Amino acid sequence: MIKKWTVICVWLVSLMIIVGGMTRITDSGLSITEFELLDGVVPPFTKKTWEKKFNKYQKTSEFKLINYNMSIKEFKVIYWWEYFHRLLGRVIGLFFLVPVLFKKLFFKRFSRLYKRYIVLFLMTVFQGLVGWYMVASGLKEGMVNVAHFRLSMHLSLAVILFCYLIWTLFLIYNHDNSIKGHKKLYSLLLLLMPFVFLQIIFGAFVSGTGAGNLYHTFPSMNGQFIPDSLFAAYSKTGFVSFFNNLASIQFIHRILGMIIFIYTVFLFFYSNLRLDDYLIKSSLYVILLAVVFQFLFGVFVLIFEMSIYFRIFHHIGFLFFVFSFVRLFFYAKKKNPN
């Protein structure tokens, strides 16, 4: 039973990350101005409750400085994105809690995985608290967006939870198999891992600061590979500019994307010719497909200034890449026979 349950959890968390991306892309995250752990489960249905929600939003700096012409009809659109994002969080928390409460029912064959579900539930609770910590930063006077450092923390924790959940799923599906692994490929993937994690952080920085709207040419940035504004920012604030200056953030995001793309292509051709393990070889094809799609779509979104509804495919592509990376990492890491 835990096998099917875990598959559902993977889909729910995937959907959660996608909806979270849409919530950010549509600037919907500040539409609900209170934590509302229990009373937020029931959405507003009457005209009076909608007006009450809208009145609270009108007190935010985002409304006063940017959305001052917003109608209540337009407000409902951004409200629903944030509402479903929070609702999914509650549903996922329950899905992780139920197996913990009914251990004998869910873990007859996989008793050793019980502790992993306790960890998953605690991670979900912590993620919810960090989510509110992020939203609270955008509700401060003068703020029109959430702090991009807190946004990156929220996204990073979501990715860590997603990876831990996928790994749990692979452990279940490979319970009776001995994974041969590949020491060299495993070492090469370890070298790639910090670049992937940094790219996730800077992807959140790009989304949180709007740095992606600064330059719309590739591979140059308005005719310069390294823009002058990057050096100017560094001369003023030093190393901190790498995390706050929009040109620096977009530049680092580009460089990391190119490094990951080139390195993954190298991994594919280097390892594919030296391996005969079907699981690893198939994982190499999947990760190559994921990185090509993600890189090309990222460039297209940048150059053609695609609408917010196209940008979500870049977000989905990142999720697909993370899944394929964990899959390859799992089969490259040698396991002991069960």
Image (cartoon, helix red, strand yellow):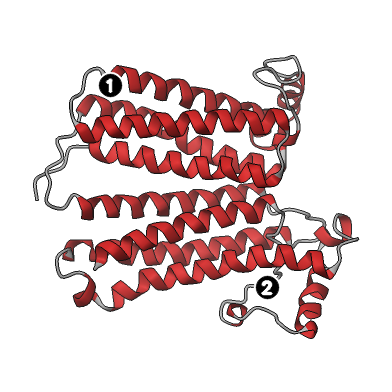
**Residue 167 place in picture, x, y as percent:** 30, 50
Q: Looking at the rendered structure, which numbered label has been put on residue 34?
A: 2
- Out of 41 and 313, give the one closest to the viewer: 313
Within-10-Å neighbours for mark 2: few <14, some 14–19, many 20+: some
Secondary structure at numbered mark 1 = helix
Question: Could you tell me which quadrant the N terminus lies in?
Answer: bottom left
Residue 116 image-quadrant placement: bottom left
Which quadrant would residue 279 be assigned to in this image?
Answer: top left
| Residue at image location 64% in from the left, 56% down from the top | 23
**In the picture provided, is 76 more to the left or to the right than 174?**
right
Q: In the image, what residue type sits under mark 1?
A: Ser
Instruction: Give the x, y percent position of residue 186.
Output: 27, 30
Residue 165 lies, in percent from the top left, at 35, 55
SS for dot 2: loop
> Does residue 41 lie above or below 23 as drawn?
below
Q: For the view shown, which residue lies furthest in the left direction?
A: 337
Q: Nearer the viewer, residue 15 or 140?
A: 15
The residue shown at (85%, 58%) is: 67
- Any part of residue 299 in sight: yes
Look at the image and tell me whether residue 245 can be seen.
no
Residue plotted at (47% across, 64% down): 126
Q: Which residue is mark 1?
A: 271
Q: Are marks 2 and 1 in contact (CB under 8 Å)?
A: no
295 vs 209: above or below: above
Give amino acid for label 2: Glu
Q: How many marks?
A: 2
